Image (spheres, coloured by chain):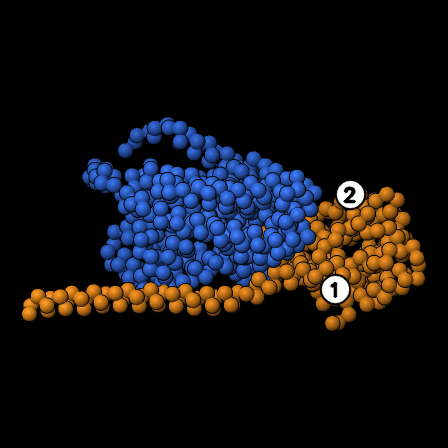
Chain colours: A blue, B orange
């Protein structure tokens, strides 16, 4: 087996991303923040927090949503996509943890919150949610790996016990994940007077929670569609329509809550001022709520996985706009600096994301995540026979 | 509440000699060059606003946002008043910089092992009964130190007895009250002072944190209840299906 891998466009792109990412990693750890970021004292949190942590965690909300639907609510029709959703969340959380290694000034002390407690700190609660929910996700996802272990006794022993605690895991996972999503918004409660009124709200926790669920489901739809399109996965297209029927009311609920919230704390006058923040706000609301809701009202969109895929990508973009607005745009005026991330900040984020996508791809190919088409099974059988 | 230490800066008496800056730099072993803004090597600076000199430093809030933000408790309000930083606990998350209503903490961005830097009101000197180095160095008495209640009384006395002063003690209500106060004859907003919320900052997040036990208990109970109903419904369905098939078989037999 000493074939040279074929050079394809995608492989070149992946190689470039990893090359840039590895250089940026070198810059971060060997040269420091000043050489690898445009972070400053007035803007101490940038792309690594806004994109890496806030978007990373939010977009991983699909796992707990689908797990709750299948195990707790008994919606069996979502069972075929359960493992995909959990896998996406698991990889999402692993990416967030990887991103934290870049973000923290002293990453080798990441274990400190286990022993050094400050119960008054929102970030303390966030750190425990990350630790505990990552563990839950690992245990929830583990059967997909363990069932490939060739030793029958180990395998059946593990799967037996995993199955017995599964409902407990799902329950704990739901609570932890809900807390985690909310608390990320809660981090910004302390920025009263700094964060623009279009984003500051005493209800930031609820807003972050309500927006994460549709965004997490949208990511699940995108992952499913890409798997069907390029990984020879067979899936009943009805499941896409079913998911879209959940995403639409969730988006509407968020939109209404957001509107009422803006009115109640008198942010309305800021909506129509000619300034960057207001434009960013409308771009966010347009992408995340208005356009997707209009699109999802058409049957032609709901019934076509391809169209749903693009609609969901709008939802994801709008969601990311929201998180970046809270963490960067909304704080710009009060900080007095105009933060534009350095290319190295993009490079590490892109590398971590690419690694997660690749891990997803290989998991779908080699593990039993989604049902495969017959041709794929035959190809794998042939491969196994050839190796033997 | 036990008595705590405080500093009063009377902007009308500052002549901009920068003795405070130099004393601070000397105490910490920082390079002597004057800096225009707070930095990791300038924990207090004199900012020029027109013909006024405004000293900037950590405000040592009574209930500090940074201390409530710090997840490992590296920042603490000490019993004597100063807000101190324990670098052995810090993990470098920089949430204190985000949280501070006065934008005071500085980060060592250019170091490979970076820490947070901010004034600690010479906590160790104060424990030993000595005034902060900056106050000791002030030749005009523009900065004075003392017990917080006495310092506040003195500030009040000055602004009430002299008509030139703005009738506000900056720090008396900002961020719920601080341990560093400013009085001035020029409106504070013209001297680069911000207008942070007047509530105690940690209270902003306490409401949400207080909900945790409720969310865990109610959420957990609710989800368990839903699960139980789902299970029960499936059981009933299965039992009904069994009964139906049994009765139809009986019907066929008879």
Residue A162 or residue A371, whichever sits in front = A371
In the rendered structure, the answer to whether residue B59 lies left or right of residue A206 reads: right
Check disc 1 and report the residue beneath it: B81
Q: Position of residue A308 (x, y in %)?
A: 39, 41
Residue A97 or residue B247, whichever sits in front = B247
Q: Quadrant of the C terminus of chain A?
A: top left
Residue beneath the point at 37% across and 40% down: A300
**The residue tagged with tag 2: helix, strand or loop?**
loop
In the rendered image, is residue A303 in sight? yes
Q: Quadrant of the N terminus of chain A?
A: top left
Q: Which chain is mark 1 on?
A: B
In the rendered image, is residue A225 in sight? no
Same chain for the residues at labels 1 and 2, yes or no? yes
How crowded pointer 1 is (Cα within 10 Å; few <14, some 14-19, many 20+) is rated as many
Q: How many marks?
A: 2
Q: Which chain is mark 2 on?
A: B
Residue beneath the point at 33% across and 57% down: A75
Check disc 2 and report the residue beneath it: B35
Dividing the picture into quadrants, the one containing residue A365 is top left
Q: Position of residue A156 (x, y in %)?
A: 26, 59
Dividing the picture into quadrants, the one containing residue A357 is top left
Q: Whole-Å distance between the Cαs marked 1 and 2?
A: 27 Å
The residue furthest right is: B162
């Amino acid at each position: 087996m000493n074939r040279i891998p074929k050079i394809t466009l995608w492989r070149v792109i992946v190689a470039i991303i990893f090359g840039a990412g590895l250089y940026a990693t070198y810059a971060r750890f060997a040269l420091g923040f000043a050489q690898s970021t445009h972070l400053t004292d007035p803007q101490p949190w940038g792309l690594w927090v806004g994109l890496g942590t806030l978007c990373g965690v939010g977009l991983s909300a699909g796992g707990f949503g689908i797990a709750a639907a299948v195990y707790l609510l008994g919606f069996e029709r979502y069972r075929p996509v359960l493992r995909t959703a959990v896998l996406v969340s698991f990889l999402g959380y692993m990416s967030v943890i990887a991103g934290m290694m870049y973000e923290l000034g002293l990453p080798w002390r990441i274990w400190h919150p286990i022993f050094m407690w400050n119960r008054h700190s929102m970030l303390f609660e966030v750190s425990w949610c990350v630790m505990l929910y990552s563990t839950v996700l690992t245990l929830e996802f583990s059967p997909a790996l363990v069932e490939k272990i060739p030793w029958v006794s180990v395998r059946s022993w593990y799967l037996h016990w995993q199955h017995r605690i599964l409902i407990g895991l799902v329950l704990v996972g739901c609570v932890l994940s809900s807390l985690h999503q909310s608390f990320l918004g809660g981090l910004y409660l302390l920025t009263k007077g700094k964060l623009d009124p279009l984003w500051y709200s005493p209800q930031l926790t609820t807003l972050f929670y309500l927006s994460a669920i549709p965004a997490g489901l949208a990511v699940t739809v995108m992952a499913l569609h890409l798997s069907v399109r390029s990984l020879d996965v067979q899936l009943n297209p009805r499941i896409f329509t079913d998911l879209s029927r959940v995403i639409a009311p969730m988006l509407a609920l968020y939109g209404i809550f957001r509107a009422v919230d803006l009115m109640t704390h008198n942010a309305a006058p800021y909506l129509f001022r000619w300034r960057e923040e207001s434009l960013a706000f409308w771009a966010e609301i347009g992408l995340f709520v208005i356009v997707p809701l209009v699109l999802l009202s058409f049957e032609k969109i709901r019934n076509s996985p391809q169209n749903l895929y693009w609609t969901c990508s709008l939802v994801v973009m709008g969601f990311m706009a929201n998180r970046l607005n809270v963490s960067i745009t909304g704080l710009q005026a009060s900080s007095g600096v105009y933060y534009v991330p350095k290319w190295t900040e993009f490079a590490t984020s892109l590398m971590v994301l690419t690694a997660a996508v690749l891990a997803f791809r290989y998991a779908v190919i080699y593990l039993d995540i989604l049902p495969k088409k017959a041709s794929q099974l035959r190809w794998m059988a042939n491969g196994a026979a050839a190796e033997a | 509440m036990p008595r705590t230490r405080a500093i009063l800066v009377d902007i009308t008496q500052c002549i901009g000699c920068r003795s405070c800056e130099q004393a601070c730099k000397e105490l910490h072993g920082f390079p002597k060059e004057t800096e225009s803004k707070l930095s990791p090597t300038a924990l207090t600076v004199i900012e020029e606003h027109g013909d006024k000199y405004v000293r900037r430093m950590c405000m040592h809030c009574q209930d500090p946002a940074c201390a409530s933000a710090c997840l490992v408790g590296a920042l603490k309000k000490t019993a004597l008043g100063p807000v101190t930083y324990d670098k052995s606990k810090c993990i470098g998350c920089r949430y204190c910089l985000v949280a501070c209503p006065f934008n005071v903490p500085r980060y060592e961005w250019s170091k490979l092992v970076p820490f947070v830097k901010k004034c600690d009101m010479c906590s160790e000197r104060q424990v030993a009964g000595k005034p902060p180095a900056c106050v000791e160095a002030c030749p005009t008495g523009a900065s004075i130190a003392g017990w917080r209640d006495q310092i506040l009384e003195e500030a009040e006395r000055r602004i009430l007895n002299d008509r030139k002063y703005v009738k506000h003690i900056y720090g008396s209500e900002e961020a719920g009250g601080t341990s560093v106060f400013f009085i001035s004859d020029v409106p504070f907003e013209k001297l680069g002072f911000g207008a942070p919320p007047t509530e105690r900052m940690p209270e902003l997040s306490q409401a949400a944190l207080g909900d945790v036990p409720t969310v865990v208990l109610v959420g957990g109970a609710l989800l368990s209840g839903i699960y139980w109903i789902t299970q029960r419904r499936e059981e009933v369905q299965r039992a009904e299906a069994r009964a139906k098939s049994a009765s139809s078989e009986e019907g066929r037999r008879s």
